[in-house]
Image (cartoon, helix red, strand yellow):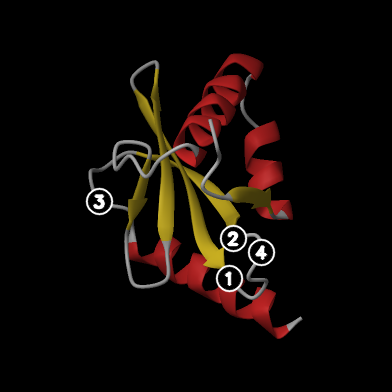
Amino acid sequence: MNKNFEVVFLEQAIDFLYSLDLKTRKKIYYNVDKAKLGLDPKLFKKLTDDIWEFRTKYKGLQYRLLAFWDKTDKTDTLVISTHGIVKKVDKVPKSEIEKAKKIRTEYFEQ
């Protein structure tokens, strides 16, 4: 099967993932890999014009990795994962979306 996109994890996303136990981390990686094969809204969902989320529910908790597209190189479309959260409410907090937007802006300014 062909992947629709590649994923790059920024430092904050890596830090978040390594703060989790191994089984949880493996489940998140599994869902990210599965999302690469097709845009499944249960796994990869658009939040705003620029920000998306990788979604994983595991052991009753909802884990989210916020992300954005990098289409500057026409050969490979990358999804950059900015940072992660454990959700306690249904909606992603606006502050987390704003944080992802700020990281996106900094990424493209480099």
Q: Could you say which quadrant of the image residue 94 lies in?
A: bottom left
Q: CA distance from mark 2 to mark 3?
A: 27 Å
Identify the residue position indicated by label 3 in the image.
91
Q: Secondary structure at mark 2?
A: loop
Of the two numbered discs 2 and 3 in the rendering, the one whose residue sits closer to the viewer = 2
Q: Which residue was labeled with disc 4? A: 75
Where residue 33 appears, as percent x and y from the top left, is: 55, 32
Look at 48% across and 44% down and name the residue there.
Answer: 85
User: Mark 1 or mark 2, which is nearer the start of the sequence?
Assistant: 1
Hey, what amino acid is under mark 4?
Answer: Thr
Q: Earlier in the sequence, mark 3 or mark 1?
A: 1
Left-right relation of 65 to 53:
right
Give the residue displayed 33% in from the left and 20% down from the top.
Answer: 60
Task: Name the image quarter holding residue 102.
Answer: bottom right
- Residue 77 shows which numbered tag? 2
**Within 10 Å of the Cα at label 4, are there few (<14), some (14-19), or many (20+) other Cα atoms?**
few
Q: Which residue is mark 1?
A: 71
Callout 3–callout 1 Cβ contact below 8 Å: no
